Image (cartoon, rainbow, N blue to C red):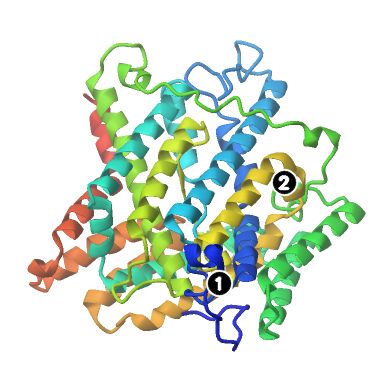
Amino acid sequence: MAPTPSDTTTEPEAATGKLDRFFDITKRGSTVAREVRGGLVTFFTMAYIIALNPLIIGTAADKDGNLITGQPMFLDAAGTQLNEAAMNESKLMVAAATALVAGVLTILMGVVGRFPLALAAGLGLNAMLAFTLAPMMTWPQAMGLIVWEGILITLLVLTGLREAIFRAVPGSLRSAISIGIGLFITLVGLVSAGVIRPGAGTPLELGVGGSLVGWPIAVAVFGFFLLVTLVAKKVPGAMLIAMLVTSAVAVVLELVFKIGPRVDAETATGWSPPGPVLPDASAWAAPDLGLLGRVDMFGAFNGPDGNFNLGYLLGLVLIVFSLLLADFFDTMGTVVAVGAEGGLLDEKGNPPRLREILLVDSLAAVSGGLGSVSSNTSFVESTSGVAEGARTGLASVVTGAAFVLAIFLAPIVALVPAEAAAPVLAYVGFLMMGQATTISWDDIEEGIPAFLVVALMPFAYSITVGIGAGFIVHVLVKVLKGKAKQVHPLMWATAIAFVVYFAQGILMDLIGRI
């Protein structure tokens, strides 16, 4: 098990009280204080979704030109005069629903799954919804498809298939998934803080033009060295302290220098949008939860003009399949990573209460559609809370409660910029690299598939892509080595499904010709 900033040499006391026994707090070597700290760290590292999901879901139009609230995106037929009042209302409503759904589901994960795992609207999934599905249909119809995707995943759990696939994954690939996710979240943190950016003539570069310039980057660097210092001195709650202190520094710098967010080349040294947002009176308005339940379960299947179209239907099926596969394996990777980081996996690499964990995650997709916020899924940022010491579902209850409070206290949450969360994500990436020693890199049957998982997660900016490539090559290498019989039947099926996933562009083109 990876060391945590909260580790002590004190032996845990015997379990006392119903809360301790219900969550196995003492049994898993934790304390209520650690669970609370871990839960808060997880919340602050993923609270950005409250601001980011509205920018994706709340600002995109459906095929009728309407926002998710049903109001027109433009005031004129030419589409030149933006309906700013409707846009702002849309973003606020999406933010409130995003926080509520994430809060309820994360609490449910804590109580039912009893695992330190938080859920919220999935990035990538929400983009596919906003920019692929919505332009093909109305928003309620698009959300209906998300519900259907969640129902399908739930059925896979109830039939035992999802759990069986999880258990069929070889140990080397599980370790590779943890490592890959560690590098992935490190890159996410560095990019969100502006430390790593698209380069001029290179895919990526350091800072602005290869230099670490600007107060926001300085804040991120300060936060990282503060965290390292606190960890080295074994200060309990190092991650949470570092994040809060760094946020306070960011707020002071914004008040003094009026830095503002970076939106173009002229503001390249600004904060990662929106930055530490200072609240005004209007920010404390009562939340509007009117998006809940705006779902059309069957309208999407009628075609764009209300008439049956085989090509359109096949394209729709492929899109839903892609959503399902991404949701399915993002969760598997996250559960493995969280369990490995917390030392919560058994000798076969499986977490406790696996079926309950997968069931809650599957219901999250359904709930995301019903809440009009996109499919909800397990967040890899949960590893930050585990690194802080969280080991039980109590941490998830704390994270979920923070999300529910965020519906009303969003201005306070907005004070924590990406630059304050980035150091924590980078440090968690370091901790997860410890899994590299469990893989036999000199064995091509283990090494090549594992390498592709580790490399493609950050390079392709996708957990699903890394897992898919590793699965396919695992099967291929086994076949080439004359060991096809050693491949689990479910690994064969999964590898074939990923081949379809990677070929979806070709298949969509063929379907378009029908």
Name the element at disc 2. Answer: loop
Inspect the image, locate mark 1, and give the three-letter code of the amino acid beneath it: Thr
Query: Could you say where residue 362 lies in the image, as x and y percent from the top left?
Result: 38, 45
Name the element at disc 1. Answer: loop
Q: For residue 164, which quarter of the picture?
A: bottom left
Residue at the spot of label 1: 16
Q: Which mark is residue 409?
A: none
- Mark count: 2
Residue at point 75% right, 48% down? 261
Screen quadrant of the C terminus? top left
Residue at point 78% right, 66% down? 245
The earlier-in-sequence mark between 1 and 2 is 1
* Residue 211 visible somewhere in the drawing: no
Q: Which mark is residue 274?
A: 2
Inspect the image, locate mark 2, and give the three-letter code of the amino acid beneath it: Pro
Q: Nearer the viewer, mark 1 or mark 2?
A: 1
Residue at point 68% right, 20% down? 83
Residue at point 51% right, 77% down? 29
Residue 23 appears left or right of 449: right
Query: Could you say where residue 418 lies in the image, as x and y percent from the top left?
Result: 68, 56
Q: Is residue 379 above or below residue 103?
A: below
Q: Is residue 269 above or below residue 273?
A: below
